[in-house]
Image: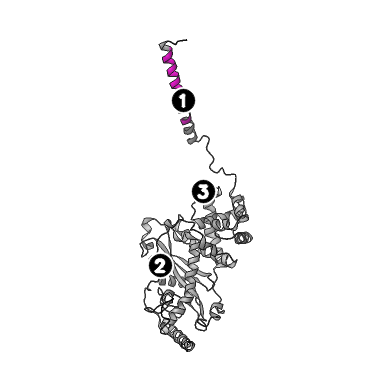
Amino acid sequence: MRLSLRDRIRKRREEEDDDMMLFIFPALYLMSSARGGEKKKRHTSEESGEVKVRRLLEGHVKNCQVAFRMEPHIFRELANYLRSRRLVVDTRITVEEKLGFFLYMLSHNASYEDLQVFFGHSNDTFHHHINHFFKVVIPALSRRYLQAPDPNQVHKKIQDNPRFYPFFKNCLGAIDGTHIPISITSEKASPFRNRKGTLSINVMVACDFDLNFTFVSSGWEGSATDSRVLRSAMSKGFQVPPGKFYLVDGGYANTPSFLAPYWGVRYHLKEFGAGHRRPQNPKELFNHHHALLRNHVERALGVLKKRFPILKVATFHMLENQVKIPIAASIFHNLIRLLHGDEEWLDHQPDNIPPRNFVAVPSGDQMNDLNVGSVQGNALRDTIAQEMWVQYQQHLN
């Protein structure tokens, strides 16, 4: 039946009204949701954080290494230690999952948002447990796993090598300074600006000849010199027993306790490599053997930063906790070595933090701020160099 003009107009208006409702109703629903109506649940994964951690520990070893930078048996050993000492306790969240929070953060520079996506808990949960590790767990672990070497023992790498024994029989290890990037508000940034122009802290580490860290001093501003950081560490408890010494680079004054190389003389190992002359005098010979031993601390730092690239980037934590990150990484490094963890896999593993985020920081030797050594330190170094040279000449003849 043919509709009248009036009916056709009315029908068209009704269709337009229907189209309008199709737009308005969804908009009203979204507005009501935003005002406290039905909200979409954020964490909808059927696999909880606890299940994810268990799957990583029971699955292929590489998955655990990528997630937590250590093998499953080491992770479990650490979790059991934390539980037995009640440093971390089981609640509705297990010790293993809480340890997973911290290691995943440390391994990936993961923000609390990243942790929410991976583990499925609230921001407040991660804030509480990550801070517990920084304030309670890391200081406790440092007392157990950052141990000074036995001053009465000559290390086998020295004892069994005629290039080093008896000349370095009183050597306890090697010391180096390394810069770790930080983030800080602009009004507080000035002292932390290093000679590269970036923001960092200057961290002093000591290690033995098994590539274990024995001491870490973290927190000095990036503008501080290595020798200033060492003096501060000594004033706060770092001790060298009488008659013993550590090997240091040219950033430190030469003393009986901290033996530095000769300046202005070949030192770095590449300068003695293939195609280069052998040592030509006592000073060059001393520098060569000194470099062979002190290279242990450089190797240890290389492994540490490869395993934990968070040490190459600025993080989101408060400065108090940023300062503890190098200490935490050193503790886990020692634990992994103690429990025979693998390091070779790191050589074939891409960085788990994008290298574009790495911050340029100072590296290499820096002339110490005093530019002198003590009379006793210089005399000790000269004596060792001369005795070493006599043996070297006898061997050549």
Could you tell me how far apart the alpha carbons at marks 1 and 3 are, in whole angstroms? 39 Å
Identity of the residue drawn at 40% across and 11% down = 5
The residue pinned by badge 1 equals 21
Q: Give the residue type at disc 1.
A: Met
Residue 273 located left or right of residue 212? left
Q: Earlier in the sequence, mark 1 or mark 3?
A: 1
The residue pinned by badge 2 equals 363
Q: Give the residue type at disc 2.
A: Ser
**Residue 351 position (above or below residue 13):** below
- Residue 318, percent from left and from top: 45, 56
Closer to viewer: mark 1 or mark 3: 1
Circle 1 residues within 10 Å: few <14, some 14–19, many ≥20: few
Could you tell me how far apart the alpha carbons at marks 2 and 1 are, in whole angstroms? 67 Å
Q: From this viewpoint, is residue 99 visible?
A: no
Q: Is residue 94 magenta?
A: no
Residue 123, which numbered label?
Answer: 3
The quadrant holding residue 85 is bottom right
Colouring style? one colour
- Residue 209, percent from left and from top: 53, 74
Circle 3 residues within 10 Å: few <14, some 14–19, many ≥20: some
Q: Are marks 1 and 3 in contact (CB under 8 Å)?
A: no
Could you tell me how far apart the alpha carbons at marks 3 and 2 are, in whole angstroms? 36 Å
> What secondary structure is the stretch in magenta mostly built from?
helix
- Residue 249, percent from left and from top: 42, 74
Closer to viewer: mark 3 or mark 2: 2
Circle 2 residues within 10 Å: few <14, some 14–19, many ≥20: few
Tell me the SS state at disc 2: loop
Which one is in front, 42 or 289?
289
Which one is in front, 80 or 155?
155
Q: Earlier in the sequence, mark 3 or mark 2?
A: 3
Tell me the SS state at disc 3: helix
Question: What segment is highlighted magenta in the picture?
Answer: 7-27
